[in-house]
Amino acid sequence: MRIATTMRAALIQDHGGIEALEVTDVDVPSVAPGEVLVEVRSAALNNTDLWTRQGAYGSPDDPSALSGWRGPITFPRIQGADVAGRVIAVGSAQDEQLIGRRVVIDPAMYDTDSPDANPVGLMGSERDGGYAQYVTAPTERVHDLTDAPLTDDQLATLPTAYGTALGMIERGRVQAGETVLVSGASGGVGLGLVQLARARGAHVLAISSGSKREAVEQAGAHEVLDRAYSIVEQVHSVVPRGIDVGLDVVAGELLQDALPLLSESGRWVVAGALGGYDVHFDVRRLYLHNAQLIGSSMHTPTHFASLMEMARRGDIEPVIAEVFSLDDVREAQQTLERRDHVGKIVMHPWP
């Protein structure tokens, strides 16, 4: 197969507003030994794309420092963590069996080779991502989903959103019969949390806006709490004894107010800060009740492999909110930022 030498890609030359994102022609990346070249068929958008463009992640010693997902990044950088596509070239002869296979890329860069390794880098931030017609990936991070019943668009939604959701559920040790509270339930991670927690047998309370109630209920929530009103009062009225696990991508005032909702030995898992990162709470609510506050950053290789097995069986059904072309990437990111949608936004890089 003859591969083009140039491709369309959406990249940032520096941190900034939506104007920092541009679509242009760049060289098709070369394939190194141990890598594959993937023709991108669908790329999903995530909040990390917005925060990386804006440089909004800060640093341990300076919360206001401009930073990518895990520190300063090299520019120009092609954005996009989530890819579904076809392998069209390999860098090593032993990987030739992958050519032509439909794949999903694990976007994480890990700290060790352990199956329980922690992610310390991310495609689209620490290395070039999938807002492009082609992208390279390490062979061990490519998962064959050729026979999965999901569409390319649905597969593209899985890596960051569902990977993060499964990581939260696993680190929070969610068990059947427990009551969980899911924040941001209409977003990509939120809907993933609702579906995965419900499938595990948990009783799911989901926080969303009233206009999105029906979609969140369809995803599997037992109760939908309206974020326009007091979450504490609503939880007390539904489950007076409190919740076993909080699955939180919002933090901010929600974490401050709702942490006391945890029952004895409850766990509160945080994987985002859409509501603010500067949080104050009464630490006595932790130690007096043997509660745990757990940070969760994406997934481990074991979590991701488990997620891919669910996709092969069709156990999950991602919701697609809207589809854009790569040339309309600015409009796509602005749509994501408005948060009026339910589910995931995806882009198609080919006309």
Image (cartoon, helix red, strand yellow):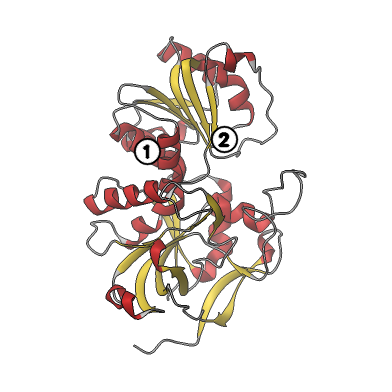
In the displayed structure image, the side of residue 74 where residue 82 appears, left or right: left
Q: Secondary structure at mark 2?
A: loop
Q: Amino acid at mark 2?
A: Val
| Residue 178: mark in rendering | none
Pointer 1 residue: 215
State how far apart marks 2 and 1 are (Cα): 19 Å
Mark 2 Cα-neighbour bin, 10 Å: few <14, some 14–19, many ≥20: some
**Relative image position of residue 329 (x, y in whole percent):** 55, 64
SS at mark 1 in the image? helix
For image coordinates 29% across by 28% down, the residue present is 201
Q: In the image, what residue type sits under mark 1?
A: Ala
Q: Are marks 2 and 1 in contact (CB under 8 Å)?
A: no
198 vs 51, left or right, is left
Tell me where residue 58 appears, x and y as whole percent: 71, 47
Q: Nearer the viewer, residue 203 or 282?
A: 282
In this figure, which residue is indicated by the disc labeled 2? Answer: 250
The C terminus - image quarter: bottom left
Q: Residue 211: where, in percent of width, then height?
A: 45, 35
Q: Quadrant of residue 242?
A: top left
**Picture residue at 47% right of the left edge, 20% below the top:** 266
| Position in image of residue 187 (x %, y %) | 47, 43
Between circles 2 and 1, the one closer to the viewer is 2
Q: Quadrant of the N terminus?
A: bottom left
User: Of residues 184 and 341, which is closer to you in this image?
Assistant: 184
